[in-house]
Structures are given as structure tokens and as C-alpha cells.
Image (spheres, rainbow, N blue to C red):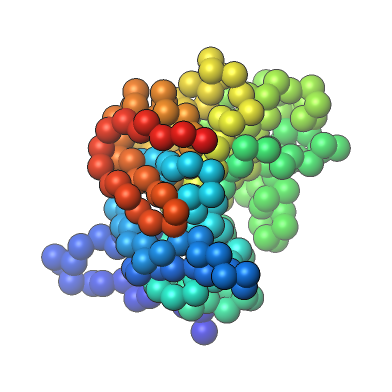
Amino acid sequence: MIAVLDEAHAPDAKPRPAVDLRDVSKVYANGRQALAEVDLTIPAGDFVFLVGPSGAGKSTLIRLLLRDELPTTGLIRVGSYEVSAMRSRDVPRLRRHIGTVFQDFKLLPRKTVRENVAFALEVTGSPRRLVSTAVDRVLELVGLTAQAEQRPAQLSGGEQQRTAIARAMVHQPRVFIADEPTGNLDPLISWEIIRLLLHINDLGTTVLMATHNAEVVTALRKRVVALDEGRVVRDAVGGYHGSH
């Protein structure tokens, strides 16, 4: 039985958080503690920056949300999914609920933009007519309708990241995780990607963005969750003055 929590039906029930971590710790086999007693709740529809120096635990936290790894202790929920209690065969369903992009775009080089985006639906057995409609929708969302038949090598870095975002959004996920999405882009293109993520958030998708870009974090005045040595050391609205 898949680890999905029953939705509350009471009229005054609070909406379920998009992300909820309770007392989560992660200790690797070599004894290194990547996360220590992390509590983090992200309401549905929020935009949250995840910051901290390299090795602070950001990537580990993201891997736990995606169920690439399991916590040593603690409870993790993403929407109605109790991630920390899921069976492996149910993980693909969770990942269709979460859109994810990374610093490296992970595009299939021999496929066109359209084919890269469509592939995310085809592997789940979606009907062809639904795939075409969904792909058209997200290509318009990210501004790549004109580049639909181009291959990744023909695209700029910003266009490649937009393709990756379209692929991540084609399932209409409720949660969108961006792990250093502007790390390989110049400042002007980085701001274009940030504006796209803000637009996605405005459409109702919860966004969690891990970044080292202090300028972006400070300028946008969104909620900032800072990790250091595996612990949440700050959780507030405002800038970030950390280091790599």
C-alpha cells in the first residue's frame, strides 16, 4: 500500500504543507552527519530559498525529498506522500508530484526540445494525444515554442535550462525543486530563469530553490532557510550573506 496520507475533510482543516520535515537526521555509513534534527515546513504555494556553504546539507535534503536516499531518523512528507515510509516501487508516483532541475541540465542530446519534454510523459505511458497537448503548454510557458525542433547543442545555456524546466513542469507538479539552477549561467540569463521560476510560483506551484547566489536571494526578499553543518541556522525573510 502506497504511503499516501488521507486528506482531511473537515471544513476548517488546514491545508496540508507542500513539504514537512520533522526531526530529520541523516548519517552516512562513514559516520558523517549530513543533516541533524532538521525541522522544516513549507506551506503550499510558497517560494523558499535554501542556502548555505558547500557541504551544509542542501543536496542531502533535496535527495531525501526525492527519496533518492532515506533519513536515518525523522519523518518526511511531500504533499500527501509520507516519503520516509514509501516502498521503492511507489517512488515514481512521488516524483511525478515533484518537478526538479539541476545546475547541469541533464538533457538527452539526440532528442529535440519537444522530444526531451515529451519523454518525461512517454516513460509513464501517457496517451500520445495528451503528451502533445501538455508539451505545447509547457513550451509556451517557458518561451520555447519557436525552438521546439532544435537539439540541445543548438540552444544557449539559458534555453537549455528552460527546456529542463519545461520537462520538469510537464507533469504539472505541485512542488518544484531547483538545485543551483543558475550555477552555469551568466547573470543576465540567471535573472531570466529566476523570473520564470517566480512565474511558475505565481501559478500556484511551491518552489524550493537551493542557491549560492546571494544577490538573487537578497533582491527577492523571499523566505530563506539557511543550513550550516547539517542544521537549520536561520529561517526568515531577507537576504543571505553566506559563502561557497
Percent position of residue 24, x then y: 40, 68
Question: Residue placed farthest to the right in the image?
Answer: 110
- Residue at horizontal 68 percent and vertical 41 percent from the top: 117
Q: Is residue 65 visible?
A: no
Percent position of residue 159, x then y: 65, 25
Q: Quadrant of residue 216?
A: top left
- Residue at horizontal 35 percent and vertical 46 percent from the top: 225
Question: Residue placed farthest to the top in the image?
Answer: 188
The answer to whether 5 is drawn above or below residue 206 in the figure is below
Question: Residue placed farthest to the bottom in the image?
Answer: 1
- Residue at horizontal 86 percent and vertical 37 percent from the top: 110
- Residue at horizontal 23 percent and vertical 72 percent from the top: 9
Q: Quadrant of residue 69?
A: bottom right
Q: Quadrant of residue 36?
A: bottom left
Describe residue 70's horizontal placement relative to residue 21 as left or right. right
Percent position of residue 171, x then y: 56, 50
Q: Is residue 55 visible?
A: yes
In the image shown, does 87 or 141 lie closer to the viewer?
A: 87
Percent position of residue 205, x then y: 40, 45
In the image shown, does 136 or 16 lie closer to the viewer?
A: 16
Describe residue 72's horizontal placement relative to residue 166 as left or right. left
In the image shown, does 108 or 213 lie closer to the viewer?
A: 213
The answer to whether 60 is drawn above or below residue 91 in the figure is above
In the image shown, does 139 or 14 lie closer to the viewer?
A: 14
